[in-house]
Amino acid sequence: MNVQGKHYRTIWLKEDQPEVVQIIDQQALPHEFRIVDLTTADEVAHAIKVMTVRGAPLIGASAAFGMYLAALHAPRHSREAFLAHVRVEGDKLVATRPTAVNLAWAVERQLKAMEAASDVETMIETARHTAQAITDEDAEFCRRIGEHGVSLIEDISRRKNGDTVNILTHCNAGWLACVDYGTATAPIYAAFERGLKVHVWVDETRPRNQGASLTAWELGQHGVPHTVIADNVGGHLMQHGMVDMVITGTDRTTYTGDVANKIGTYLKALAAKDNGVPFYVALPSSTFDWNMRDGVKEIPVEERGADEVKYIRGLHNGEVVSVLITPENSPAANYGFDVTPARLVTGLISERGICPATEAGILALYPEHKR
Ligand code: MRU
């Protein structure tokens, strides 16, 4: 998508230096647009852990490139030594963040592809192609999510005689969380491109404020009208008819339609249900967990450091500073995600279409996963 009018993806191989992966530093946004070079799998793992890159599909794409870098630096004297090395690096990448299933999915896909190759040089080439394929596929899948999801916005716009469609979103499920287009934002960008009047309520998304820092930034870069709101505002807006629909992303969705997403999503879904506001979740198929049935019981929820809750980061006199907002000695808990049960989800928007958040609905779109 656009940054100062120029098209960017979130991850790519450096031109003329294919042994270097480049990413946008999402910790520096929105105050600075900075590109970072990554040259080893360990650097990729660190970038995922500290959230220089984040968002389920982008974590998957980053891990895929991490595996390519692992392959580049693996011992070449034997196939076995090479594979042992990339497996260890793969385990390290998977361990960085537990909730987004895309991470393990991407590492698994890389390992399978490399294992099928006969010699080390071919395995390295395969790892590079697979990373590129995962990245290109994610961009294309998000574009298709936009094509399917825009019909929902068009319907509301028609019902409102062309008046502005107000969409609430949580966290950043935009292009910054993916490779391009985003998941939740893809239908919004598509509607905007078609000239529909849209306006986005952007939840700030404490504690790391991905909504306030990232979603607001990317919508602004693209010219999409939006308003940042504190996390607790959504219910009030829904009660007053100021939200026509909610669209969020997801980090892991069970084959029965339970959705793990950034902490606070569940509360928005409850408020939406109470107010008859449609609640949609957008995802590429890499975010389905085909082995999990009960999201609340089974999806691992990441717990991060207390300082993310206790301190808030922002620009002060031109410098990014961190400010303590709790009593110094108060403990803080930092649950990164919650699970919205399928019964609260109006529908899922994937690259294959829109379906009910039910096992039957999901498997009708993905019959190859029927048991
Ligand atoms: O902790 P984050 O910033 O990685 O969490 C991101 C989210 O919760 C997104 O909504 C989710 O990954 C979907 S991204 C298209």
Image (cartoon, rainbow, N blue to C red):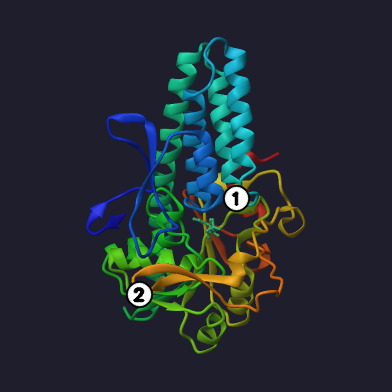
The residue beneath circle 1 is: 100
Closest to the camera, between mark 2 and mark 1, is: 2
Instruction: From the top left corner, tell me how far across and down residue 302 is, in percent.
Output: 66, 56
Q: Residue at x 32, y 36 (%)?
A: 14
Instruction: From the top left corner, tell me how far across and down residue 339 is, in percent.
Output: 67, 62
With 93 as the anchor, is 161 left or right in this view? Answer: left
Q: Is residue 342 above or below residue 51?
A: below
Give the mark nearer the N terminus: 2 vs 1. Answer: 1
Q: Which of 68 and 359 is in front in this view?
A: 68
The residue beneath circle 2 is: 317
With 323 as the anchor, is 359 left or right in this view? Answer: right
Q: Nearer the viewer, residue 108 or 295?
A: 108
Residue 182's image quarter? bottom left
The Cα atoms of the two marked residues, 2 and 1, are separated by 36 Å
Q: Is mark 2 on a helix, strand or loop?
A: loop
Q: Is mark 1 on a helix, strand or loop?
A: loop
Task: Mark yes or no: residue 182 visible.
Answer: no
Q: Residue at x 57, y 43 (%)?
A: 103
Kind of residue indicated by mark 1: Ala
Q: In which quarter of the image is the C terminus?
A: top right
Q: Which of 246 and 67 is in front in this view?
A: 67
Q: Nearer the viewer, residue 236 or 144?
A: 236
Mark 1, Cα crowd under 10 Å, few <14 / some 14-19 / many 20+, is many
Kind of residue indicated by mark 2: Asn
Is disc 1's CB within 8 Å of ligand 1?
yes
Q: Quadrant of the N terminus?
A: bottom left
Q: Which residue is drawn at 62% across and 78% down?
A: 326
Task: Mark yes or no: residue 350 visible.
Answer: yes
Instruction: From the top left corner, tell me how far across and down residue 329 is, in percent.
Output: 70, 74
Which numbered tag is attached to residue 109? Answer: none
Instruction: From the top left corner, tell me how far across and down residue 57 is, in percent.
Output: 50, 48
